[in-house]
Image (spheres, grey):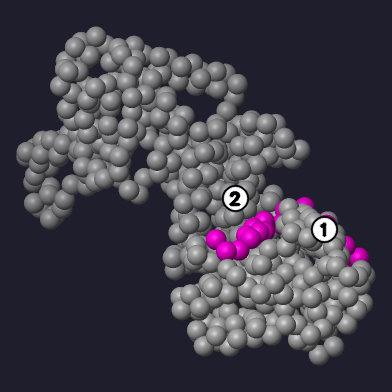
Amino acid sequence: MSYQVLARKYRPALFSEVVGQEHVLKALKNSIEHNRLHQAYIFSGTRGVGKTTIARVFAKCLNCLNGDMPQVEPCNICTVCEEIKVGRHLEFIELDAASRTGVDDMRDLLESTQYKPTNARYKIYLIDEVHMLSASSFNALLKTLEEPPSYVMFLMATTMIKKVPKTVLSRCLQLNLKAIPQAQIKQHIGSLLDLESISYDDESISLIADSAQGSIRDGLTLLDQAIAHGNGSLTADQVKALLGTIDQSYIIELVREIAAGNGDGAYNAFYKITELNVEYEQVLRILISVFHQIVLHQEFNNNDSEPIQNLAQSMEPQIIQLHYEIALNALSKFHVHPNPKEAFELCILRMLAFHPAEVDSASKQEKKNFKINSSSKVQPKITKPVTEAQNRSLSTNIEISDKQPVLMDQQADIDLSNLDLQSWNKMFESLELSMFIKQVFSEFEFKHYVDQVVTLKKSDDLISPTENLKSEFRDAVSKYIGTKISLEIESGEVVESPAAAEKQKIQSRLDEDKLELLENPTVKDIIDSFDGKIIDKSIKKVSP
């Protein structure tokens, strides 16, 4: 095999070639310079951040023949450096703990520690994935690890430091490697592509660096795939097709329609995304990232993208936080859903369902029109723009309705010293709340009011309200009661929330109207003659 993958071809041979991990490299260099070497080192961190690579370079520094003492940087020329590089040095024993977990393997390893090195300063044992060793192997290692011969040194690497016994950790110098920042991965990928004389654009390597998630090896593996997919060159469109991602503009359009409560527009934006045959989990991650960018711009004004700036100005912070929580909750359950496309669809529908109720019924109808059917094509809906006069009238009506005073006789009917569920539901209708806050808290059931603390109960499937939402609701209750209260929200089965009580009230009124109709001789005769029935939705109470 003549081709060598990039992760192996450009594996660092010197400390200066290692990407990131300056804090670890500084500790190792200082220990060599001041001759304060520990008998055992353990390198921990996620995959592909340089644990084994740094351990090998450190081993070359300790045994390099270019001088009488260990070197801060190996020469990479002497026989020891060359043999360690290719894995043939007799005094550098590399053990894969995942394949040799038994205590017998550990005994064989420890027996060799009694023999001094013949052509090196130290006999170095590198144990990779050390957390895979059995409990007996760890116990067998403890004594030698604590008091090894002066010429023996242990280097260990693990991705799961929590699985290593504390008795082992206490005998080692622990060095934690960090995830590599995206900017450093991007710069490293760009430099390698220049060495390979491969053409690329800035967006393509940004996508790969972002998908690497802090791992240099993952980034280089994706780079190999992208080069093969692009036939020797990198373009943003080809990398997006490989990774299953899409341009952020599609998500911006989707967020804009969701923010407007436009069901038809949201479906049209979603339909454009489905035509690209994307990975829906990746699209959901981009959606979360867009909400994150909007929130940051609202707080710090730090985004240069005009679409992000426009969304930040038009969307309420509370709504963004709610949509962010919905998307994050959908992502956490994405892997258990049988159909990724349906999981993404339900996430959009939930955002539309939890959007604040609009004053006009047209927007409600648009939300209902969001019907997910990838096989059908939808014609974009053209809506008539609202005139400035209508907008002023609409704003005036909302302002008046929100500022209606609480009637004293309604408050007098409620005994605040013995507030119960029925009294709470009655009081809830009189609270000065915005439509969105009222919609959220109407789903919560009153539990008790003790020592100026109101305790509510919510269903497990409902998202907990943000601190801003709770603060606004708490202020409204405090204003109604006349004293400052605290608010606690617990999870449990909700039976009679204000929303459920209102629904039951409407149903009772409907049953009464239906019974009144059935007592009408004419209606009764028609039903008996044609074996008919009364449809509930058809009953409309006509005002006298």
Res 232 seen here: no
Magenta region, residue range: 170-194
> Can you say which quadrant of the picture contains the C terminus?
top left
Drawn side of residue 1 relative to residue 496, left or right:
right
The disc labelled 1 sits on which kind of residue? Glu
Q: Secondary structure at mark 2?
A: helix
Q: Please tell me how many numbered marks the rendered image carries.
A: 2
For label 2, the residue is: 287
Kind of residue indicated by mark 2: Leu
Q: Quadrant of residue 147?
A: bottom right
Q: Is residue 381 above or below residue 342?
A: above
531 displayed left or right of 469: left
- Mark drawn on residue 277: none
Tell me if residue 110 comes above or below residue 443 in the rendering. Answer: below
Residue 186 within the magenta-colored segment of the rendering:
yes
From the viewer's side, name the closer residue of 111 and 180. Answer: 111
Q: Which residue is mark 1?
A: 33
Distance from the alpha carbon under mark 2 to that under mark 1: 49 Å
Q: Is residue 299 left or right of residue 356?
A: right
